[in-house]
Image (cartoon, helix red, strand yellow):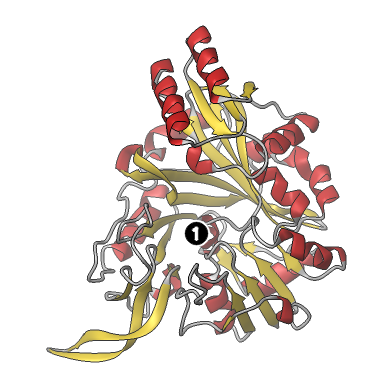
Amino acid sequence: MKILVIDTSQDGVPFAMRAQARGHDVRIFQPPRTTGESQLAGRGYVNQVREWKPSMKWADLIVMTGNSMYLDDLEPYYEKGFPIIGSNKRAAALELDRALGDSALRLVGVDTLPYEVFDTIDEAIAHVHNTGITYVCKSWGGVEDKSLSFVAKSPADMIFRLEQCKRLGKMKGKLMLQEKVKGVEMACAAWFGPGGFGQWKREVFEEKKFMNEGLGQNTGEMGTTIRYVKKSQLFDEVLAPMEDYLHGTGYVGNVDVNCIIVGNKAWPLEFTMRFGWPGYNIESSLHIGDEAERLYDLWDGKDSLRVREGKIAVGVVMAHGDFPNFKWSPEEVSGHPITGITPAMEPHIWPQWVMKKKAPVMKGEKVVVEETCCTAGHVPFTVTGVGDTVDAAREDCYGRVWKIDWPSNRMFRTDIGCRLEGQLPKLQVHGYAKGMRYD
């Protein structure tokens, strides 16, 4: 099969490499760097192309990893029925426009947390003063900047943050304030196509903060715990009602809704209408068979996903340099030779920003210079482990993570999955994550 990967989110290299290893003819397009040069990620491993449009008619399958670039240019291809896995404009809007995502959930009868929208920061500050309530703040409408989201610890905390945003010129458009609730964060997801949702549903527990115990800045994601089930109470409550709506968008791909569960009530927070990083790599460690063929079947209305039933996957993001600030140049975080990966480990390593390059390596007691796997950016890998329990999957994963090294500073969280030891019993009292065991 001829496959074009339009990798706008720069997380498509693992899929491209694995599809290529299966014998598929793969081309990958990544938006060029600000200098106009091609991206380093995947160099030497996959066939990188400078333009995506010339390969559209060539491809039997087109995989879109992101959902915020080239949507206008891609729309005619969706309308003509090109075999595209990934977000068109209508589906992407559920994630990128928080107002639309919220209204879509309400339209299908799913309750969402109450909120208020403010035209200016000054209005929001006055509201916090008047109510004395602790809020979560997010930008509102259009293409949301998730980096501006803020979860306050107190009303004073929120007022300081809003005043800081005003002073620095951030969050210039509308913003929303949503009353903060305490609960357990958990997501549900499934693959969607012309045949509707697939039979397998995912239950997902992300860790978005940089440091152990949820400390540090929000990186997007540092690691995740995932399992596949055929029956999920959370899916039935917040995602199953969206099926008819999603058919109306013409979307084919992954659908994920992150939630906060308070007692016996699940409150949806936001959609992910794309592959999702590093979630897709982690869930793929539970997939069986040819992933490219499975994705083509999805577009064709067939549900051919096979998974490692009853297993749990844990994935850990490995980073270096000045991650998660990304101020160091690509050259500063690239070219570091990676050591410690054995052939037995390779199926569990999901190369993110890596490249083939000549570098000094050890051959016995001697230093030689040869082409080897090197870093190509701030986030070289996601590493996965699988087990019957969360603890077993953690042990399997970290047994690999600690063996991987490079000359720069390694950074990763050591507690991915740990929060579930205390949270699973609380969820299971109310029917969520049933049958999932920590140890």
Q: Is residue 274 left or right of residue 407?
A: right
Visible in this render: residue 151? no
The amino acid marked with disc number 1 is Ile
Q: Nearer the viewer, residue 371 or 53?
A: 53
Report the residue that reaches farthest toward the right: 80
Label 1 sits on a secondary structure element that is helix
Q: Residues within 10 Å of mark 1 (few under 14, many from 20)?
A: many
Residue 28 image offset from top left, x and y in percent: 60, 77
User: Which quadrant is the C terminus positioned in?
Assistant: top left
Residue drawn 62% across the image and 59% down it: 66
Residue drawn 69% across the image and 74% down it: 293
Q: Nearer the viewer, residue 295 or 425?
A: 295
Q: Is residue 395 left or right of residue 111?
A: left
Q: Is residue 109 left or right of residue 294?
A: right
The correct choice, above or below, for 209 with respect to 24 in the image is: above
Pointer 1 residue: 282
The correct choice, above or below, for 184 with respect to 189 in the image is: above
User: Which quadrant is the N terminus positioned in?
Assistant: bottom right
Q: Nearer the viewer, residue 227 or 29?
A: 29
Residue 263 image offset from top left, x and y in percent: 54, 22
Report the residue that reaches farthest toward the top: 130
Residue 255 image offset from top left, x and y in percent: 67, 50
